[in-house]
Amino acid sequence: MAMETVDVLPLNLLDAYACWELNRRCFPERETYDLATFRVLLDSPDSVSYKALDGQRRMVGFLVGLVDRDASLGRGRGQLLGSGHIIAVGVAPEARRQGHARRLLEAAERGFRRRGITIVHLEVHATNVAACQLYTNAGYSVTQRLARYYADGDDALKMVKALA
């Protein structure tokens, strides 16, 4: 039975635990972020992150993104670089292939545009055919292959999209 997405809403610090739990269901342990990392990411003023909720208001998907800043500028938040980074996208195993990741991606791109971001980048497992297809269909292009990027030794594909 398909779960219908009721809403795609911004993620915030209060969602960190639920996001962490879902992340652990979506990815192998060596590829997950810890709870403290989710708290830092979701509490950042540069967060551009969203959750997909099912009809029972359960989180069935998440996307964590950040506005890129030049941290080498010393104190403060750094200079806005005009790009955004999609750090993690996860959809519950039982809720996959229902358009949740696409809706999350569209929401994040709108969020990045509202922040003045003109280009978005991400890394994806080179062997994750479904995710690569999702990003390709959404207009992302492979710009680089990153050898042995992941903890399991898998390569990553660096993908980029210009936001119009």
Image (cartoon, grey):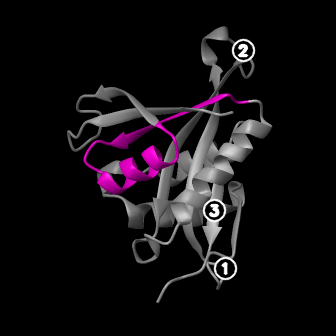
Mark 1 neighbour class, 10 Å CA radius: few under 14, some 14 to 19, many 20 or more:
few
Mark 3 neighbour class, 10 Å CA radius: few under 14, some 14 to 19, many 20 or more:
many
Q: Secondary structure at mark 3?
A: strand
Relative to the observer, which residue lies in front, 94 or 32?
94
> Residue 2, relative to residue 108: is it above or below?
below
Task: Give the distance between the C-alpha atoms of the residues marked 3 and 1, in whole angstroms.
Answer: 10 Å
Give residue 7's position: percent from left, percent from top: 70, 70
Is residue 149 rendered to the left or right of residue 98?
Answer: left
Q: Earlier in the sequence, mark 3 or mark 1?
A: 3
Residue assigned mark 3? 51
Residue at position x 71%, y 36% in the image: 46
Residue assigned mark 2? 75
Q: Residue 119 in magenta?
A: yes
Residue at position x 49%, y 48% in the image: 88
Amino acid found under the numbered disc labelled 3: Lys
Q: Residue 10 in magenta?
A: no
Give residue 35's position: percent from left, percent from top: 52, 54
Q: Nearer the viewer, mark 2 or mark 3?
A: 3
Residue at position x 63%, y 16% in the image: 70
Task: Give the distance between the C-alpha atoms of the residues marked 1 and 2, in whole angstroms.
Answer: 40 Å
Amino acid found under the numbered disc labelled 2: Arg
Is residue 48 rendered to the left or right of residue 105?
Answer: right
| Residue 57 badge | 1
Give residue 87's position: percent from left, percent from top: 51, 42
